[in-house]
Image (spheres, rainbow, N blue to C red):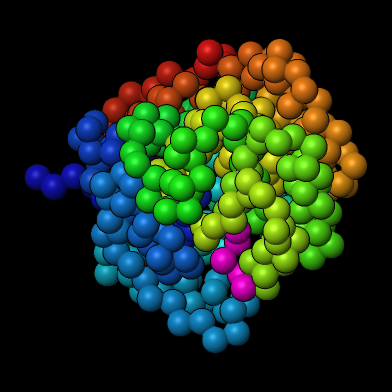
C-alpha cells in the first residue's frame, strides 16, 4: 500500500534549505511520501541547495518569464500547479515562508481543497511595506493554511493575536537550524576558490557581510559598503567576505564600492555548504538576511542587522542580533564595539539560539502526519537551545 503524498514546494534557496531536512525526516518516519517540487522561481539555486543534502527535486516546473514581474511569475506558477494537482493531488502541500512561490502554492492548493501546511508561520514585522512583498505574502498564506508551523512561541502568539485557532498552531522550531548544523558539521572543503584562498592560512577574524534585499540596493548599499571600508582600514586583523547578489547592477555597485580594499573578498552567491562553514567560522556577521539571523546564534556568532525593521524579533529579544540599519556611522560604531571587546561579543549569543534545537524537521514531519490522522500529535518545542 502506497503512502499518501505530501508535496513540499520551494522556489528559492532559503526554501530549499529549510524544506530539505523535512524531506529527510519524513522519509525516516515513514508515515507519508514526501515529493519535492521546485516551482521554477530560482531553479538553479534550488537544485544546488538541495544537492548539499543529497536531494534533487522530484518535480520541476518550467516557468517562462518575459517581463520578470511578480505578477507574471505568480500567474504562471499557479497555472502549472493547478494542472499538476488536477492529475496528481497530494494529501497535503507544505509551503515555506513568504515568497511568491509560497503564496502561489498555498492558493493553488486551497483552490483544489488540498490542506496547506505553512512552515515558518507567524513571522511579522508589523510593516506591510517592509520587507516587501514578503510581509503581505505571509499574512495572506495565514488566511488559508490548515496547519501553521511556527518557528518560535512569539511567532505562534502573532498568529493567535490574528485570531488563528490555537488548535491549528504548533511550535516546531526553525528547520534552518537543523540544516545549517548538519551541513556545517561536515566541514566540507570550500567549493568557491576565492573563499578557499582567502581562508587558507589566515589567522584574521572573519567578518561575513551579506546585503541582498531589494530595499538595501542603491543608496543604502553604498552606505553599507562605506562602513565595510572603514572597518577594514580600522582593523588590520579582519578579513571580510561578501557574497554578492547575482543582479549585475548590484554586483557592479559592490565591486566599485570595495575596489582596492585589502582583505576583502567579493564572490558570487555561495553554495550552501560554503556559506554554512563561513558562518561557523565568523567572528561577526553584518547582514540583511532573515535566514542568517536564524542560523548565526547556533554558532555563537552575533548579527548586526542591516535593516530598519526585522520580523525576527526573537533575535533582538534574545540579544543575539541588533538592528543597525544602513547608516555608515552606526554600522562602524556597533561593529567596532564587538571587535574591540570579545566578552561583549560573546555575551550577545550566550543565551543560545531562540530559533531551535535541531529537531524542528522531525516535529514538522510528525505534525503533518498528525494533520492527516496518521499519528498522534507531537510535542511542541519548549525553551531555547543552549
Residue at left offset 86%, top offset 46%: 328
Farthest bottom residue in view: 66
55 lies above or below 351 = below
> Can you see residue 257?
yes
Horizontally, is 19 left or right of 30 in the view? right
Residue at left offset 71%, top offset 13%: 343
> Can you see residue 96?
no
Residue at left offset 81%, top offset 44%: 230
- Give how far across and how far down residue 358 sits, in percent: 43, 25
Front residue of 62/54: it is 54
The N terminus, quarter of image = top left
- Give how far across and how far down residue 362 sits, in percent: 35, 29
Front residue of 255/308: it is 255
Residue 189: which quarter of the image?
A: top left
The magenta stretch is: 244-248
- Give how far across and how far down residue 321 sits, in percent: 71, 30
Residue at left offset 23%, top offset 38%: 27
Horizontally, is 227 left or right of 39 in the view? right
- Label the magenta part by its dominant secondary structure: loop
Amino acid at each position: 500500500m502506497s503512502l499518501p503524498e505530501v508535496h513540499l514546494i520551494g522556489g528559492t534557496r532559503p526554501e530549499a534549505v529549510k524544506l530539505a531536512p523535512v524531506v529527510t525526516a519524513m522519509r525516516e518516519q515513514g508515515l507519508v511520501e514526501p515529493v519535492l517540487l521546485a516551482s521554477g522561481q530560482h531553479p538553479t539555486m534550488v537544485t544546488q541547495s538541495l544537492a548539499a543534502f543529497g536531494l534533487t527535486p522530484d518535480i520541476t516546473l518550467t516557468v517562462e518569464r518575459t517581463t520578470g514581474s511578480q505578477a507574471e511569475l505568480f500567474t504562471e506558477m499557479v497555472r502549472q500547479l493547478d494542472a499538476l494537482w488536477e492529475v496528481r493531488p497530494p494529501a497535503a502541500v507544505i509551503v515555506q515562508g513568504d515568497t511568491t512561490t509560497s503564496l502561489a502554492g498555498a492558493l493553488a492548493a486551497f483552490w483544489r481543497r488540498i490542506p496547506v501546511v505553512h512552515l515558518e508561520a507567524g513571522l511579522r514585522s508589523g510593516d506591510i511595506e517592509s520587507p516587501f512583498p514578503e510581509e503581505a505574502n505571509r499574512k495572506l498564506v495565514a488566511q488559508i493554511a490548515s496547519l501553521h508551523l511556527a518557528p518560535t512561541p512569539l511567532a505562534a502568539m502573532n498568529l493567535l493575536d490574528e485570531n488563528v485557532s490555537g488548535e491549528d498552531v504548533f511550535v516546531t522550531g526553525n528547520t534552518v537550524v537543523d540544516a545549517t548544523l548538519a551541513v556545517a558539521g561536515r566541514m566540507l572543503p570550500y567549493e568557491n576558490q576565492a573563499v578557499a584562498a582567502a581562508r587558507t592560512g589566515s589567522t584574521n577574524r572573519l567578518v561575513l557581510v551579506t546585503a541582498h534585499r531589494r530595499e538595501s540596493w542603491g543608496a543604502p548599499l553604498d552606505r553599507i559598503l562605506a562602513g565595510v571600508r572603514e572597518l577594514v582600514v580600522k582593523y588590520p586583523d579582519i578579513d571580510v567576505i561578501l557574497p554578492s547578489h547575482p543582479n549585475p547592477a548590484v554586483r557592479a555597485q559592490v565591486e566599485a564600492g570595495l575596489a582596492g580594499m585589502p582583505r576583502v573578498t567579493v564572490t558570487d552567491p555561495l553554495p550552501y555548504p560554503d556559506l554554512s562553514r563561513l558562518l561557523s567560522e565568523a567572528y561577526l556577521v553584518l547582514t540583511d538576511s532573515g535566514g542568517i539571523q536564524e542560523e548565526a546564534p547556533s554558532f555563537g556568532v552575533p548579527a548586526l542587522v542591516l535593516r530598519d525593521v526585522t520580523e525576527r524579533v526573537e533575535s533582538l529579544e534574545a540579544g543575539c542580533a541588533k538592528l543597525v540599519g544602513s547608516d555608515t556611522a552606526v554600522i562602524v560604531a556597533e561593529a567596532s564595539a564587538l571587535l574591540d571587546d570579545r566578552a561583549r561579543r560573546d555575551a550577545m549569543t550566550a543565551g543560545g539560539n531562540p530559533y531551535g534545537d535541531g529537531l524542528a524537521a522531525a516535529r514538522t514531519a510528525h505534525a503533518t502526519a498528525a494533520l492527516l490522522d496518521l499519528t498522534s500529535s507531537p510535542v511542541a518545542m519548549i525553551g531555547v537551545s543552549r
